[in-house]
Image (spheres, coloured by chain):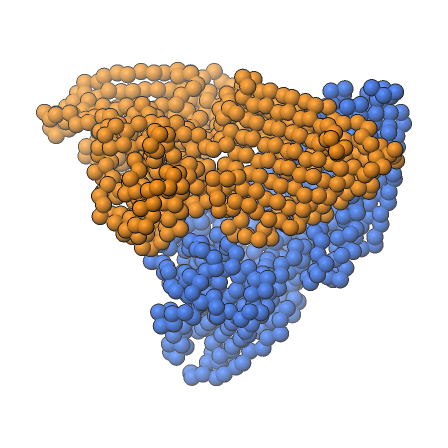
Amino acid sequence: MKNLLFASLLLVYCPIFAQNEWSVDKIPAALLTDAKAVVRLDQNYITIKNTGEAMEESRYVVTFFTQPKDYELTIGGGEGGFYSTPTLIGRLYDKTGKLIYENEKSEIQKFGDFSYNSFSNVRTKLLKLQSQELPFTVEFLKKTKSDGFVSLSDNTILRFDRSVQKYEMTIVCPEDYKFKWKSVNIDLKPSTMTLDKKQIQYKWMTTNLTVQKHEPNHPYNGNNYAYLAFSQEQVQLGKYVGNASNWKEFGQFVYKLNNERDEISPEMQAKVLELTKGVTDKSKKIDLLYKFLQQNYRYVSIQIGVGGWQTLEASFVEKNKFGDCKALSNYMKALLKVVGIPSYLSLVYGGDDDLTEIDPAFVKMSHFNHMILFIPETGSWLECTSNNNPTGYMGNDWVGNRQALVLTPDGGILKQTPAYKEQENKKSSTFNLTINTDGTSNLTSKSVRLGGMEDYYRTLNTEYKGAELEKEFSKKSALTLTTLSNLSIKPNAEKPETIVTYEAIVRNFANKSGKRYFITPTKVNPLGLTLSKNEARKLPLLLKDAYTLEDSISINLPSNYKSESIPENKKLESATFGSYSIAYISTENTLKVYRKVVYPTVSVPASEYAKAQEFYAEIVKLDARQAVFTVDGGQ
Amino acid sequence: MLQKTHFLTILIVFSTLTLFSQPYKWGETFGEDLKMTSYPEDTSAKAVVLQDIGNITFDSTRRDGKLLDLDVVVINPDGTKTPVKSANIYTEKLSKYYSAKKVFIPNLQKGSIIEYRFELVTNNFLRLTEWNFQEDLPVRWSEINAHIPEFYNYLTLSNITFPIVINETNRKNGNFYYRGEYYSTVHFRKALKNIPALKNEPFVTTIDDYRNKLEFQLKEYTYPGQVTIPVYESWPKLAKELSKDTDFGDQYLKTSKSKVLVEAAANLLKNTDLPEEERLAKLLEFVTTNIKWNKETWLYKDKGINDAFTDHQGNMADINLGLVALCKAAGFEAHPMLISTREHGHMTPEYPIVNQFDAVLTYVELKDKTFRILDGTSPFHGVNMAAPEHYNRGGWVMREKDPIWIEVTAPERVSIVTGALDLDETGNLKGKMRLSVNGHEALEFRNKIANDPEGKYMKNEFSGKFEDFKIDSLSFDNVKDFTKPLNIRFNISIPNAAQVANDFIYCPAITTFFIKENPFKAISRFCPVNYESTLKAQYIVTINAPKSYKVEEMPAALSLLLPNDAGKMTFACGPTPSGETQVVMRLNIKQIDYTSDEYFSLQEFYGKVVEKTQDQIVFKKL
């Protein structure tokens, strides 16, 4: 077992024999520029025994020049399911490279996943180190064993704000073990070597990578700028083995894993038929059954059942009235089956933060973390873990606007989920304000919120009631509401639309100073998007959120006031960055303001950044202009 | 030894009120309560605790154990009962000392009632588990029963502000069996009803200080035929015990325990001709530069003073007891001061119990009998400043023979902004400003500067407040001199700060670095308000308008007082002799505690302050 001997050499490496190896002086000067930290060594060694067994060892040494966040001083590992983490070691070195701390085994914290609604047989191990006087160096050693399931996940080479002195990735596998690899945002190729016993070693190596500075609103997921990605030809999950050489085959494998787990009781079948009795329209049937699911079943995170890849039986959900994303999707599928509507479980990435594009030619099993349901006859999708989404609504920042892998009997099919554009994520509001002589204002407001502009309020309405709802609503308001009355939040059950109306007395809207009123009308709904100036922008710019705001603001002042200064009407338009228009109509002691702002999704190269920055800064500047009113005829 | 049973039912989402008579028995049907879809006493509640009943009994045959016999039943609105199977109950280890039972509730619906009971066996009878009458959810009925054998004399520590509906003490003869004999017990019963939910609020020491709760603390015990053994008696007795404790008193009273530290500081001990405060500052600096705090707040030693010094790392006791030892060696009258951190909750000087403390500071008495507090958990405190969380109204100074309670308040939080700004004809402001801070405000900035000595990040942080805001030539004074305010000087440029329209320039009187938001936004208040310290904020800036403009209107002067002279705000705007416009705003909060009724005065006061900061100066073209 030469590979194992090789692997353990990595860990036996003892810091005592190289006293000053991690001295800060040994970092090449070029790596210090802009570096919040320098990765001294990032060494990974993966030994693959077969499709289901592997061992991964890693050694990560990093010198911090600015105070690290807690998570940067923490290393974790899993225990249970297909994994175990037999080794977890953390060491601290001072700036001269002297070892000042190494953890004892007892300092590793172990606990179950004790979050609010989760159901898991996986335990977590965590090791947290203490911050030291800067600069200081942290070394983490970790060994993970996989038994039953091997997934080669992305391996980051370069993170933002960290330079890398040495990176190494080694994979040793039997010569008949097939996998693909690609390097992203870096050009790296492995050297290969044949070892004993028909083993092949692949080794990627690079040194002295200078800092890639972090700049906000970039298209790279997480903080992974350059990384290696892998794709295995064979997939094994416990006793199940399948092909993962392309999406079709991989989809077929997961399909089989989850197939024929959708039996529900005759009573439930009867109930489903009764619920849909007399309804012929398929969409209506889907809607009825989806609402039945939402009203009677709840989401619980479940990490059991073939490493989290296999759904619980539909009968489990029927009995317990809860399930995870797989179990609830599968249960919904079972309900639809009763009324003769076929549907397919579909793998998808849920969330916004680490979303990457799917490469149709490169299967990455670790891409997905969630399951939804696809109905081919109507072309519609169902997110079965939501208790309040309108039927078919996906949401851009959750599972909409991305590719999902639909699991059909004929294999996996990549399919785009619905995307919601700027006109579908829209908020149209009217604000009527009457300014009182004491400077307070009476406000009545109505907004019609669509798509991405409504889900916060839909959720708020489910989570809070009465006085608590009013409190939460007030917190979110841009204005200081001294009283709030007749608050009504009405989510539409059929479509992603929520209508919010309320009345309030507002404190800081008009500023009365001497004989004048200073009023910034757009204070009722300030604009959030600003980009910081950056003349040397290097990363492309991505502004994902696309939305539209339409405001009609009507302001009535006490009758003895007249306008002294009213801002000019303005219009700003760009094919790429969106548009802004504002009009002020002033008559006697009233002012009416109409504003429309459109923010499309923006994806442009770094060279366009300055233009975008100026455009949005100009909008904010125009928007912040105030109107001034004085007492007619002086004081 | 001790056995507690706990019987609790919770209802998820409700409706009509049923007149409450007697608590339900285990397994009884819930009748009208099953129809509840909202709790009438608090319609914003997501659930209500129908009843929470605890029984504490003693049993000499039981061993220390865990949570046992957990039964959970779900009762749905249609009356069906589903017992939770043991397969759906998991035990999760949370830490070395604690584990939790996690229950997956099947078949849950709106209006379901969850009923559960369990038993907890423990042999810690010094302090019986705290009974919380008040929860994060409203509670309709909460009752604690304790059946205490006659040999034990417990003191009840309680914080109860809602009416007690049952308060009984009965003696029962011969119902406790101990070593072949029967003894009597005393049955305490206390119940509260309709207790509102406790919600967290800002400006409190800790929300737990306001929770309605009860605790039993053992005072003394008398086993049959034996003498009475006091568990605690008096503060001097406790002081005597602690002074002999190897993990506490020995640390600074036995010279061998601090020898390494004291000898290393030998040079400092000789400077007896320096003023006392300067000597203290040097001793404090010696400790903070040599021992880094490991973030552990505790009053007993971890490594001990000598090892903490050698390892350059230690817990709070290693550091602050080390300071006591060092100050004593330097000839000062020094003692540990035991405190409870704000999070740990309030202290009760009435009861000499050590477990109400969780932290220790250093107390030093000077020749003039005034005292100074030292806290070596940060290198930036200086003499007479501790971390903000260590100010919880005072502490217990453990003089071995005659310990005393003293009141300590945090130093005033001071922030003074001065500056001179030029206004140009397009509405830009440009000039120099200085921020002068003291108290914990200075501590926060000194912490930032330690990681950012050139102010690179601070520059960005200041600039980030406004679009296009530019800060440069940032410099600091008195970073290391804790006896003086920390000064931050910088040049500032604010494009489009003022609005130019027709012949007017409307310039905000106060642009930034002053309070801009009301900290008291909530429309209601349950708890009293507590500030960590008194506050002083001032803004004194001159604005120099272009020569071709004159002042058309200046904001009116305003002076506001909080009731009882608890706080004051003044605002004035006027011309300087050289023709600029000067804006002066002063805010001073002199009182740190306010009742929940006084909250509204504070809210109104801050509302007016914030409004005043938005005033504008109107300049008109000549």
- Foreground residue, A108 or A493? A108
Residue B503 point in image, percent of width and height: 87, 34
Figure check: A618 above or below B616: below
Residue A502 point in image, percent of width and height: 71, 27
Q: Is residue B173 among the parts visible in the rendering?
A: yes
Res. B602 image quadrant: top right
Q: Is residue A225 among the parts visible in the rendering?
A: no
Residue farthest along the right direction in this orientation: A587
- Foreground residue, B426 or A239? B426
Figure check: A171 above or below B501: below
**Going by the image, does A224 lie left or right of B129?**
right
- Foreground residue, A176 or A251? A176
Residue farthest along the left direction in this orientation: B225
- Hue used for the chain lettered B: orange
Instruction: Residue at 64% x, 37% y: name it.
Output: B418
Quadrant of image for the N terminus of chain A: bottom left
**Going by the image, does B107 lie left or right of B421?**
left
**Going by the image, does B610 lie left or right of A114?**
right
Residue A584 point in image, percent of width and height: 86, 35
Instruction: Residue at 60% x, 72% y: name it.
Output: A182
Quadrant of image for the C terminus of chain A: top right
Residue A531 point in image, percent of width and height: 71, 51
Instruction: Residue at 76% x, 33% y: name it.
Output: B579
Instruction: Residue at 55% x, 74% y: name it.
Output: A206
What is the number of callouts on the image? 0
Figure check: A362 above or below A546: below
- Hue used for the chain lettered A: blue
